[in-house]
Amino acid sequence: MLMNTKLRKPFFVGSIVILVLSMTLAFQVKNDKLFALAKNIDIFATLIRELDSYYVDEIDPDQLVSVGINAMLEELDPYTEYIPEEESDDFRMLTTGEYGGIGALIGNRGGGNMILMPYTGFPAQSTGLKIADMILKIDSVDVSSKPTSQVSELLKGPANTPVKVVVKRDQDTLEFSLIRKKISLKNVPYYGKLNEQTGYIKLGDFTTNASAEVRNALVDLKSQGISRLILDVRDNPGGLLNEAVEIVNLFIPKGKEVVKTIGKLQNVNFTYKTTKTPVDKDIPLVVLINERSASAAEIVAGALQDYDRAVLLGRRSFGKGLVQTTIPLTYNAQAKITTAKYYIPSGRCIQAIDYAQSRENGSLTTVPDSLRKEFRTANGRVVLDGAGIEPDEPVEEVRYAPISYTLVAGNHIFDFATQYFYSHPSISNPSEFQISDQDYEDFKKFLDGKDYDYTTYTEKSLQDLEDYLKKEEYFQEIEGQLDAIKNKVNHSKENDLNTHKSEIRKILREEIVSRYYFQEGMIAASLEGDPAISLAKSYFDSPGKITSVLTASRK
């Protein structure tokens, strides 16, 4: 179509005017924003100087500024963080899984700090430190009354430097000479065969080399003859995005989109695709998730669900669809800033909380079910955005009785396992070891005279009922009946060690196994009786069940 020449010149001039006005307005808006930033930074700096000069007590500028920065960032989201120089080592450990030390988890038990878990293959374990060793001295420093954080710092140090640790074990005082090493925490703390056909991989984190560890575990399991696999990302808080992409690539073909990141700046917008030939694109696969599976764990589970590559079992995941970028600041400080949201192959974002909305009234705003949008997997199954990854079949969370929580919280399980270890030089392997009836009777005797009082769910309900009755002035009418019920409950409570024997034995078994086989053995022992594992096996054992779920036209 030809343009009318009489209109062309005025139209052209008008367009130029509009363009100039738009550029001027944009420039003005940008200048206003820059001025506002500069003004407020100047006000902040001036305030700190005046406080330092005039405030009645001495102030610590570093602490005051850190508090101010952190309070400011709390207005945004929980993942945007300020990392001062002195915390850079801890941050590096979180992102890389590496630090210099002896390779042991420590914590406070029984009024002092003790070894809670020596990691296999690192100095603490190879030198002979054991779970429940009470730390008395580090080099020449008495640490018997120091907080855990200080004890941890004393144990850390550059690789290849010596450290002496004095511990109390049972009735003995022992000294160990260790050489610190570069500690790389495992992303895959355990993998193995559940039976001749079924492999299991526990993926606990997404630090550097996570994908390589999963690949090595998968290749090893396949060499042992497995023909189906369970990938467990329950309780996995996430981590490095590229590691998640590489793990998805183990199971889907080259060239497939895994995740997109979309933010305000063009340089954070990126589409991540698989770049390698998969290790196995056909092996029947089940992924286990729960409410503590977040971020990179959700990318792995969500992408495999979107491609109908795996059946997901468990509970709805956490719902973290935000991407963080680490930005260097002056004086070796850093900022971890939320720069984008990620979108998995179906097009959905699984972010569950709208932090922009929550800033207005101070409360967290979740995406209501009525506003969640429908998306479709490769086979046309309906999936929803805005609330994490939902499993293809839910698994109810295991709820333990109050007595079990109390026995764990009071360290009675921990202490009995330690006593058992001192009197039993060895046990059978984690999958075979069981708590015998005699072991359990010994545990009950061990509890004699120990305080493990607790409130049952029934007692709590009765107390609530009593409070309501007193408010309604009905209490006197049924006080006698209420007392009779309480007496019956108390009588039943005395039998709780027998009533809940099965679950207490399970907890005891896992704790005792950890003394001999450490973290790997504890995980292996925990799989027995795990309802999610049992459900996964039922999928494998029912021909066509996985295919039926993954090819359904509606979720």
Image (cartoon, rainbow, N blue to C red):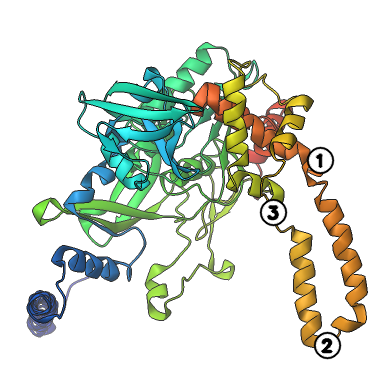
Q: Label 2 belongs to which residue?
A: 473
Q: CA distance from mark 1 to mark 2?
A: 38 Å
Q: CA distance from mark 1 to mark 3?
A: 16 Å
Report how many numbered discs are placed on residues in the image.
3
Say the numbered circle drawn on residue 498.
Answer: 1
Give how far across and how far down residue 107 sits, in percent.
43, 42
Q: What residue is drawn where x is 81% and y is 49%? A: 494
Contact (CB < 8 A) between labels 1 and 2?
no
Q: Is residue 253 visible?
A: no
Q: CA distance from mark 3 to mark 2?
A: 30 Å
Q: Which is nearer the eye, 160 or 247?
A: 160
Residue 34's place in the image compared with 274, above or below, is below
Q: Label 3 belongs to which residue?
A: 453
Residue 70 shown left or right of residue 185 in the figure: left
Q: Secondary structure at mark 3?
A: loop
Q: Earlier in the sequence, mark 1 or mark 3?
A: 3
Q: Is residue 46 visible?
A: yes
Q: Earlier in the sequence, mark 3 or mark 2?
A: 3
Residue 203 shown left or right of residue 448 in the figure: left
Amino acid at the residue labelled 3: Asp
Crowding near pointer 2: few (<14 within 10 Å), some, many (20+)?
A: few
Question: Residue 208 appears in which quarter of the rendering?
Answer: top left
Give how far across and how far down residue 381 sits, in percent.
60, 48
Amino acid at the residue labelled 2: Glu
Residue 76's place in the image compared with 138, above or below, is below
Contact (CB < 8 A) between labels 1 and 3?
no
Residue 410 shown left or right of residue 439 in the figure: left
Q: What residue is drawn where x is 62% and y is 38%? A: 413
Crowding near pointer 1: few (<14 within 10 Å), some, many (20+)?
A: few
